[in-house]
């Protein structure tokens, strides 16, 4: 997800390096050697890591703002300007103030901070774009070049040619680099906006058609009151979207809740929490959902009163005007029009879940009261991802689990209780926007995009994208679909004329920079870490050490570029990052929460929990009070007239239903590429971040899951090197032969760095070599889980 969504919802420090390296007497090499030596040196010491015993240790409470949903307390132990070890929150768990402990990634951050491959100084490209050949330049030259190109491209093509790519590497604080770039672009004519995100892109657009909003979740302490939990394609043991979620799930189980996990993989969450794992074929969840609804309808297990009072479109009597007979949910389920009742037997053939099991889950979920159907976002990063979120919401609604404590409304599931003031504001004079997933289209054929493609704010763009700022993101290459297609596009210097990347490492995206800037880690700057919308806490981001080498915070970089336009003072308002942190705290106290801690308290405690008397329950006001839902009808729209009026009923149906996916199990392409390929968000990485961390590679290596049936058919044994391929590309990876994945499906954890060999074939298992750029029909979102592929022994 992106902080934009969150906002919407709520409304030469070279000196240090000299000191640092000089301290242990390593030669002044601005390369790997000195750093490596230092790391070895500090690691060979006992836990306290105090290589100078007489020097005091200072513990700085800080926070990672990479794009996992959690935020956690990271305690940097600093001795003489060096982080020697990392601790975390050790407070006891409590319902109101749960422990905010760092996961394996959080505990492994020193390997990132002192990684020998850190970018150390600004560079300019000297070879062909993408070749990875760079030459060191001064900061002055980097800043001059960037300011010059911003102006040249703006003058020549207009502000709509300037773009800041989706980049989530430092999005969850006050100063995300991409916002700093946007602020400066906004101050100098503007830039092309994007909407939506890669996380819940389909859900974000679809859920409001049912509920009028994406705020369809409840706070996690509410699950302590539930009897039955379905985690539908959600894997919170590994995928962190809120640091204390696991604690609440454990408590819910202690209170007797039964947990069902529906996932093609036997996930860590299934192992740790599930009473039952229900394997399912990817892209077919809606068939199971339809059949569950069929069981509820035919066995009269639905909540008549709730539906009558709060929903439209359930049966023919509750349909909006102007729609012909036979289009209601009930008519669809019973096969009134197409002659196909959506029975569990019908669904079993599609999704692979036995009919008897579908019946059992339908009955249990409908009668448990209250029951929580919680949806992950993996199942909506699919060809018709819009359907699954509306499908989940449909089940929650017809069982009357919406607006009730211990129930859950499903859908996108946002909720939030962690608002602080973001003091850095700006307004883009350009109103045109594209769906974020279509940025590569906007490079190729921006001026041809129309409202049909999702262009908003203008009828036509005046230019294709010509300048890209890619700040703390790997979306330029690694995280976007179809790497081979994207890299070809970017190699053409006539298309995008200028690319700036700021990162910590020479990532696959960084290789495509024209100017490459060395960024800082969160240890090297002040900030406040804000969780995703699934948290009720904020974490202090203390600065533990000065920036290493010639690394610079993007805030300072863009303030310097602003200087070239005579706008430095206007950009920074004369404030440092520390000043802004203090402004945020002061204003949060004055404008939002009088009991918010002072800077001193916050930095000492490291964390602030917002506490509440009772759990937040999504749609409580609508169900208990008289408030209307924010939909056109004021009710839950099981049938959406707005979707109906789009008149694309096959791909954008007005009720949620199973739509067979291209590259799904029913696609004839299966003859050629018989395996469905999905990915997941791996515990050892945050997307592509940490892929180069050796500790984490040891903890959880990059490997492809394949079922023994599929492996045997292909003569593949556990640990074998295999080639995975489809028409878009090929990659090599080691196979993990395991019954933890359903037959017919292979799984590759997303985020490994694209590492091509001489022939351009990936060696590391970078999933997006195989994914498609075809967007979902309504949201124009990323379908990165919908792929067919074949595997051979390498
Ligand atoms: N196939 C497939 N593709 C996917 C997904 C999927 O499920 N499957 N998921 C999608 C989703 S949900 C998302 S959100 C995107 C995420 O994709 P991105 O937003 O590109 O996220 P990361 O890959 O983590 O890239 C973050 C970059 O920032 C750098 N970085 C980290 N911290 C800092 C810092 O403090 N300063 C600077 N300057 N740089 C820093 C890291 O080194 C890294 O290169 O990927 C999407 N891509
Ligand atoms: N450790 C870690 N945590 C993270 C991140 C990370 O990179 N690493 N990234 C963060 C970000 S930006 C995001 S957006 C979230 C992502 O959060 P999610 O999208 O919820 O996470 P995923 O792991 O992509 O998908 C969840 C599960 O969906 C399953 N799945 C895939 N296809 C289907 C399907 O068709 N049907 C069903 N039923 N299940 C399916 C996968 O096997 C996986 O176990 O995670 C966040 N948290
Ligand atoms: Mo995401």
Image (tube, rainbow, N blue to C red):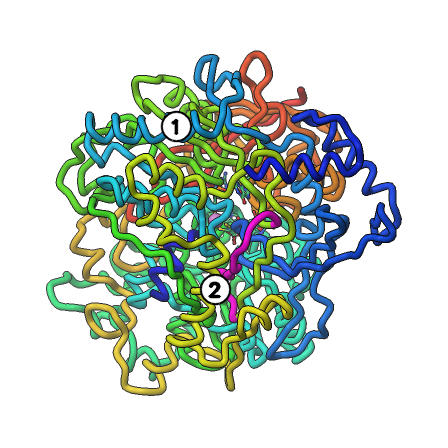
What x and y, as percent, mark residue 788? Answer: 49, 33
Vertically, is 501 above or below 218?
A: above
Residue 690 visible in the snapshot: yes
Instruction: Give the image quarter of residue 394.
Output: bottom left
Badge 2: residue crowd in 10 Å (few <14, some 14–19, many ≥20): some
Answer whether residue 516 is magenta in the image: no
Alpha carbon separation for disc pair 2 and 1: 33 Å
- Name the one closer to the observer, 11 or 136: 136
* Mark sitting on residue 270: none
Residue 356 visible in the snapshot: no
What x and y, as percent, mark residue 149? Answer: 31, 26
Vertically, is 691 above or below 431?
A: above
Answer whether residue 526 is magenta in the image: yes
- Name the one closer to the observer, 530 or 770: 530
- Name the one closer to the observer, 332 or 683: 683
Q: Residue at x 77, y 36 (%)?
A: 38
- Residue highlighted by disc 1: 499
Q: In this view, does 117 lie to the left or right of 432?
A: right
Instruction: Give the image quarter of residue 433.
Output: top left
* Mark sitting on residue 582: 2
Q: In this view, does 540 lie to the left or right of 722?
A: left
Instruction: Give the image quarter of residue 336.
Output: bottom left
- Mark toward the start of the polypeptide (2 vs 1): 1
Q: Main secondary structure of the magenta part?
A: loop
Which residues make up the magenta segment? 523-536
Q: Is residue 759 left or right of residue 276?
A: left
Vertically, is 689 above or below 376?
A: above
């Amino acid at each position: 997800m992106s902080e934009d969504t969150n906002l919407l919802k709520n409304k030469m420090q070279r000196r240090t390096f000299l000191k640092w390296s000089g301290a242990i007497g390593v030669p002044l090499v601005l390369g790997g050697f000195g750093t490596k030596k230092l790391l070895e040196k500090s690691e060979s010491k006992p836990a306290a890591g105090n290589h100078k015993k007489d020097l005091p240790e200072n513990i700085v409470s800080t926070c990672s703002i990479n794009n996992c949903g959690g935020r956690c307390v990271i305690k940097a132990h600093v001795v003489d300007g060096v982080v020697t070890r990392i601790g975390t929150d050790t407070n006891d768990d409590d319902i109101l103030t749960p422990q905010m402990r760092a996961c394996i990634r959080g505990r492994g951050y020193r390997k990132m901070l002192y990684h020998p491959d850190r970018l150390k100084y600004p560079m300019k490209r000297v070879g062909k774009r993408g070749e990875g050949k760079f030459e060191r330049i001064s900061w002055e030259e980097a800043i001059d070049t960037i300011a010059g190109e911003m102006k040249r491209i703006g003058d020549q093509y207009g502000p709509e040619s300037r773009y800041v790519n989706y980049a989530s590497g430092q999005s969850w604080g006050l100063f995300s680099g991409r916002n700093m770039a946007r602020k400066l672009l906004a101050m100098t004519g503007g830039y092309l906006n994007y909407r939506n995100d890669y996380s819940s892109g389909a859900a974000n657009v679809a859920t409001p058609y049912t509920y009028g909003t994406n705020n369809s979740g409840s706070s996690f302490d509410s699950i302590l009151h539930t009897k039955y939990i379905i985690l539908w394609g959600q894997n919170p043991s590994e995928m962190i979207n809120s640091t204390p979620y696991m604690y609440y799930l454990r408590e819910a189980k202690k209170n007797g809740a039964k947990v069902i996990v529906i996932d093609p993989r036997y996930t860590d969450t299934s192992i740790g929490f599930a009473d039952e794992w229900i394997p399912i074929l990817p892209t077919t969840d809606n068939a199971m959902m339809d059949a569950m609804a069929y069981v509820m309808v035919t066995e009269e297990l639905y909540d008549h009163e709730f539906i009558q009072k709060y929903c439209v479109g359930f049966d023919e009597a509750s349909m909006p005007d102007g729609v012909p007979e036979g289009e209601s949910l009930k008519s669809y389920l019973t096969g009134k029009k197409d002659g196909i009742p959506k029975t569990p037997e019908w669904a079993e053939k599609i999704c692979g879940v036995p009919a008897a099991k579908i019946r059992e889950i339908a009955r249990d979920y409908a009668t448990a009261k209250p029951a929580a159907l919680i949806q992950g976002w993996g199942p909506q990063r699919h060809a018709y991802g819009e359907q699954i979120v509306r499908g989940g919401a449909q089940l929650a609604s017809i069982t009357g689990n919406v607006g009730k404590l211990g129930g859950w409304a499903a859908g996108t599931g946002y909720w939030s209780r962690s608002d602080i003031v973001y003091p850095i504001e700006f307004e883009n004079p350009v109103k045109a926007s594209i769906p974020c997933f279509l940025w590569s289209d906007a490079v190729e054929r921006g001026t041809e995009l129309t409202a049909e493609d999702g262009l908003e704010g203008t009828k036509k763009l005046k230019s294709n994208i010509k300048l890209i700022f890619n700040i703390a993101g790997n979306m330029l290459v690694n995280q976007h679909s179809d790497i081979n297609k994207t890299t070809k596009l970017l190699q053409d210097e006539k298309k995008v004329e200028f690319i700036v990347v700021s990162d910590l490492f020479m990532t696959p995206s960084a290789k495509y920079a024209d100017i490459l800037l060395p960024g800082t880690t969160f240890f090297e700057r002040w900030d406040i870490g804000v969780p995703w919308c699934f948290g009720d806490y904020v974490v202090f981001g203390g600065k533990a050490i000065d920036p290493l080498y010639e690394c610079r915070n993007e805030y300072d970089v863009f303030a310097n570029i602003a200087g070239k336009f005579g706008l430095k003072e206007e950009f920074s308002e004369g404030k440092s990052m520390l000043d802004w942190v203090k402004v945020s705290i002061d204003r949060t106290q004055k404008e939002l929460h009088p009991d918010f801690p002072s800077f001193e308290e916050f930095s000492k405690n490291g964390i602030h929990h917002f506490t509440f008397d009772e759990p937040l329950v999504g749609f409580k006001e609508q169900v208990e009070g008289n408030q209307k839902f924010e939909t056109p009808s004021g009710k839950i729209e099981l049938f959406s007239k707005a979707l109906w009026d789009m008149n694309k009923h096959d791909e954008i149906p007005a009720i949620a239903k199973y739509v067979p996916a291209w590259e799904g199990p029913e696609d004839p392409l299966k003859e050629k590429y018989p395996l469905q390929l999905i990915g997941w968000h791996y515990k050892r990485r945050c997307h592509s971040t940490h892929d180069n961390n050796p500790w984490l590679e040891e903890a959880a290596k990059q490997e492809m899951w394949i079922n023994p049936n599929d492996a045997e058919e292909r003569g593949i044994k556990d640990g074998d090197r295999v080639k995975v391929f489809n028409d878009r590309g090929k990659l090599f990876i080691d196979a993990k032969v395991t019954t933890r994945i359903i037959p017919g499906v292979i799984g590759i954890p997303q985020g490994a760095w694209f590492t091509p060999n001489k022939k351009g074939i990936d060696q590391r298992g970078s999933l997006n070599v195989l994914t498609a750029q075809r967007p979902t029909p309504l949201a124009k979102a990323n379908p990165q889980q919908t792929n067919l592929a074949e595997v051979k022994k390498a």
